[in-house]
Image (spheres, grey):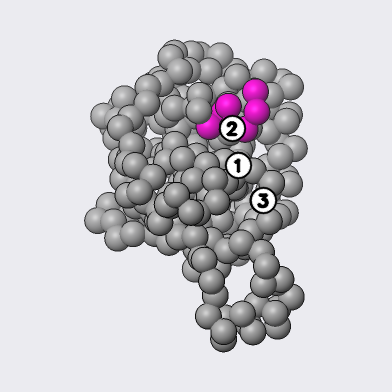
Amino acid sequence: MTLQEAIEARHSVRAYRLQPLAEDASQKIEEEIAEVNRRGNLHIQLIQDEPKAFQGSLAKYDKFRNVTSYLVMAGKRADDLDERIGYYGEHLVLLAQTLGLNTCWVGLSYSKVPGTYELGEDEKVVCYIAVGYGETQGVGHKIKTVEQVSNATDITPPWFRRGVEAALLAPTAVNQQKFFFHYVTKASQSAERSLEYIGISDNRHQVHAKKGFSMIGYAQIDLGIAKYHFEVGAGKVNFDWV
């Protein structure tokens, strides 16, 4: 399964079979966690065979069942921490899908079990991601149109539309999809000089992604998730996030 196929197949799953992660699958996830922790300056941890985190009243209310493995999404406090958690966390979510696993991003429905994870100085837990073998493969939800979340037109490059289409399949809190992708057709003269100063060629494509206002929060995490999906959908195109 490719990452694009994983994007299309993956849905949030809250009910799991009582089955530990296969050894090869957990090993691959651990290896990738080490890599994304290095690249994203994060402290993500895989917890296995631990049922207490999803046995609270809120987890039961949200219909979580038999969650015994999960990712603790943590990192050093910073303004962009939530976005990095979303971006690199979704990388792990899609990897899990390619390994035959199911997942669910969890913002509130978990309990922090003492002794199950470690935090360094000035680090915090942002959220959890449930992972395991689902009772089902989940179901899709209604999504917005490309035009509602981007400035894609008949004259923007096809890869930009493909990226937006992939972003629309990204999981977001209560399916809010509070993001917008803007294809930058021409930088201003001052912006061009700034790009040249930092070594970015002015003939590269530029995309601006921003989060919208959300009453329930999590929009910055959602933006990171959507940006990862966009990159997968767009393919190997030379563009810069601006």
Q: Which mark is residue 4?
A: 2
Main SS category, magenta section: helix
Q: Amino acid at mark 1?
A: Val
Q: Are marks 1 and 3 in contact (CB under 8 Å)?
A: no
Q: Is residue 230 left or right of residue 236?
A: left
Residue 195 highlighted magenta (yes or no):
no
Q: Are marks 3 and 2 in contact (CB under 8 Å)?
A: no
Q: Which residues are magenta?
A: 1-7
Note whether 238 is above or below 103 in the view shown: below
**What residue is shown at x 65% (from left), y 77% (from top)?**
195
- Taking depth in this image into account, of 77 and 88 the one nearest to the observer is 88
Which amino acid type is shown beneath numbered disc 3? Val
Whichever of labels 1 and 2 marks the residue nearer the N terminus, that label is 2
**Taking the image as drawn, is residue 81 in sight?**
no
The answer to if 3 sits in the magenta stretch is: yes
Q: CA distance from mark 1 to mark 2?
A: 6 Å
Spot occupied by residue 40 in the image (x, y as percentages of width and height): 65, 56
Question: In this rendering, is residue 15 above or below 177?
Answer: above
**Residue nearer the viewer, 106 or 47:** 106
Q: Which residue is mark 3?
A: 237
Q: Nearer the viewer, mark 1 or mark 3?
A: 3
Q: Is residue 160 left or right of residue 172?
A: right
Q: Are marks 1 and 2 in contact (CB under 8 Å)?
A: yes
Q: Residue at x 30, y 32 (%)?
A: 142
Identify the residue position indicated by label 1 in the image.
232
Quarter of the rendering occupied by the C terminus: bottom right
Could you tell me which secondary element the residue under label 3 belongs to? Answer: loop
Q: Amino acid at mark 2?
A: Gln
> Disc number at residue 103?
none
- x%, y% of residue 118? 60, 49
Residue 22 in view here: yes
